[in-house]
């Protein structure tokens, strides 16, 4: 068997088109120019973060969203960064704020930044990453305001590929605040942003201390790999006919690879996301979606 490829790039393009259409439609309804504004805060010179922020900015412009970047040197202090966040919170022309992670380890006079304090300071109505405790809490209670971009992109991908997980066993490998934890909550809920078929799953969160990870993974009808370890999920860890979603973006010898050993996995799985071109583009598409949502919430 060779797995069907789940084309995240194509689906992300569809979603971006939908956002662009909604932006234009809102301007017509309002009878005035309407361009939501997203500001990315980039601290330091990390090459990967610079690429991510540039890609986000380009995607914004194509969707009729204003994308700005505030750059701070790596040697900035915690107070400098907190001041920028406060100013963006108070700036009525700014609808969405994202602080690109990771923050440089050597910043804040060598002590490193307090990431938690920075993320907690973002106005929850502008928190398009959905990292603030308010937005995480609302999600936990099944009444989300913003959905975190990567897990929401995966829900959209499953829905638009007609894949149901209701009643099925989903194993999420990885327990990060950004992907693993919210992903598990969203798929275990009664209802989701795409209805009841991409929800209602029986979810297991596996992690670095999970005993017999291979058996746990092999019991998954849908396996979501979000560990950040290149090609850790081998072919023999996948149930024949399973759906495999690879969230990993790892650089090995200059090449991008996922958390799943793709060549082995595609011989076993029914469907799989490639890296690149799978989950990555969906994260940006959902960020645009959240920026539009933020602008609308702030008008209400
Ligand atoms: N770094 C890696 N992924 C993300 C993300 O989704 N949001 C932010 N702000 N930083 C990231």
Image (cartoon, grey):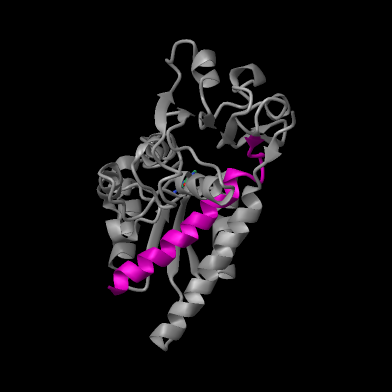
Q: How many callouts does the rendering have?
A: 0
- Residue closest to the eye, 285 or 7: 7
Q: Is residue 11 above or below residue 1?
A: below
Q: In the image, is 121 to the left or to the right of 178?
A: left
Q: Quadrant of residue 175?
A: top left
Residue shown at 50% from the left, 70% from the top: 65
User: In screen coordinates, is 85 left or right of 282?
Assistant: left
Q: Residue furthest top?
A: 212
Point 64% across, 20% down: residue? 234
Q: Quadrant of the N terminus?
A: top right
Q: Nearer the viewer, residue 23 or 7?
A: 7
Image coordinates of residue 12 in percent, x first then y, are 59, 55
Q: Which residues are magenta?
A: 271-300
Q: Give the residue at x 70% y 34%.
A: 3
Specify whether residue 206 is painted magenta.
Answer: no
- The structure residue drawn at horizontal position 36% and vertical position 54%, both measured from the top left corner, is 146
């Amino acid at each position: 068997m060779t797995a069907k490829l789940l084309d995240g790039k194509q689906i992300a393009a569809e979603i971006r088109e939908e956002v662009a259409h909604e932006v234009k439609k809102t301007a017509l309804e309002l009878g005035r120019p309407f361009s939501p504004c997203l500001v990315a805060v980039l601290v330091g010179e990390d090459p990967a973060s610079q690429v991510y922020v540039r890609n986000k900015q380009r995607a914004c412009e194509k969707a009729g969203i204003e994308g700005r970047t505030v750059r701070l040197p790596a040697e900035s202090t915690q107070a400098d960064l907190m001041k920028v966040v406060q100013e963006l919170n108070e700036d009525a022309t700014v609808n969405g704020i994202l602080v690109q992670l990771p923050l440089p380890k050597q910043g804040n006079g060598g002590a490193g930044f307090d990431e938690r304090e920075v993320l907690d300071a973002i106005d929850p109505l502008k928190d398009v990453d959905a990292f603030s405790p308010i937005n995480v809490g609302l999600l936990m209670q099944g009444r989300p305001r913003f959905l975190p971009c990567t897990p929401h992109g995966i829900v959209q991908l499953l829905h638009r590929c007609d894949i149901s997980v209701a009643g099925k066993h989903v194993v999420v490998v990885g327990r990060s605040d950004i992907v693993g934890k919210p992903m598990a909550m969203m798929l275990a809920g009664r209802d989701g942003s795409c209805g009841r078929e991409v929800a209602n799953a029986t979810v297991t969160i596996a992690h670095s201390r999970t005993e017999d990870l291979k058996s746990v993974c092999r019991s998954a009808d849908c396996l979501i790999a979000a560990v950040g370890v290149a090609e850790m999920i081998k072919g023999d860890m996948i149930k024949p006919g399973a759906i495999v979603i690879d969230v990993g973006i790892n650089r090995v010898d200059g090449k991008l690879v996922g958390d799943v050993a793709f060549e082995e996995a595609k011989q076993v799985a029914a469907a799989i996301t490639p890296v690149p071109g799978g989950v990555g583009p969906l994260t940006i598409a959902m960020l645009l979606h959240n920026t539009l949502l933020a602008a609308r919430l702030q008008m209400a």
